[in-house]
Image (tube, rainbow, N blue to C red):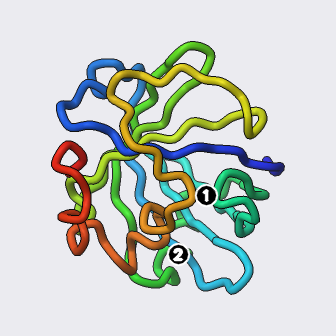
Amino acid sequence: MSGLEIERKFLVRKGGAFKRAAFSCSRIRQGYMECADATVRVRLRDDKAYLTIKSHSLDGGLTRYEFETEITPDDALHLLSLCRGGTIDKCRYLVKSGQHTFEVDEFYGENEGLVMAEVELGSADEQFEKPDFIGMEVTGDRRFYNSCLLVNPFSSWRDTLPEEYR
């Protein structure tokens, strides 16, 4: 799969409403490889694995080119051992809202307490229905990029956010 990725990211309010609304949940472990001009991610999601390359965004984090291909779980384990700074560990919940599906990530480890949602769009100005648990938009805020959470985990700056998000 490759093409332009258009997505918006939001913080999720405390309370767990997203779990009750979810139609799917999967465990994800992912790491990042050093690359100056793109983000290179290795991901294990349940019993499948993927290698993804994302370009840097030129419009504040809303759109960027993405290439993704499935790899074997064994290859992913070998590649994860080459990733810098460890891995991100999270559960991803899928929640339908109108015509869109929100991916809600609940993080563990040093990022425990962080819950974010993202929605992929067909265009930058596409309208969508936000579920009630969706809060503050963080699209383009690098602190919330998974690759940045390895270097600067949520536990080190969580107190900078309003109480409803930590």
Percent position (x, y) of residue 40? 64, 71
**73 relative to 29 in the view: left or right:** right
Residue drawn at 83 percent across, 49 percent down: 3
Q: Amino acid at mark 1?
A: Thr
Percent position (x, y) of residue 46? 44, 45
Above or below, 115 relative to 39 = above
Above or below, 133 relative to 30 = above
Percent position (x, y) of residue 13? 27, 37
Q: Secondary structure at mark 2?
A: helix
Q: Amino acid at mark 2?
A: His
Q: Residue furthest top?
A: 98
Percent position (x, y) of residue 101? 55, 26
Residue 108 falls in image quadrant: bottom left
| Number of numbered discs on residues | 2
Q: Which residue is mark 2?
A: 78
Residue drawn at 50 percent across, 18 percent down: 97
Q: Which residue is mark 1?
A: 72
**133 relative to 129 in the view: left or right:** left
Q: Earlier in the sequence, mark 2 or mark 1?
A: 1
Check disc 1: other Cα within 10 Å, few if <14, some if 14-19, many if 20+.
Answer: few
Q: Nearer the viewer, residue 32 or 7?
A: 7
Q: Secondary structure at mark 1?
A: loop
The Cα atoms of the two marked residues, 2 and 1, are separated by: 10 Å
Q: Nearer the viewer, residue 28 or 112?
A: 112
**134 relative to 52 in the view: left or right:** left
Check disc 2: other Cα within 10 Å, few if <14, some if 14-19, many if 20+.
Answer: few
Residue drawn at 48 percent across, 36 percent down: 103
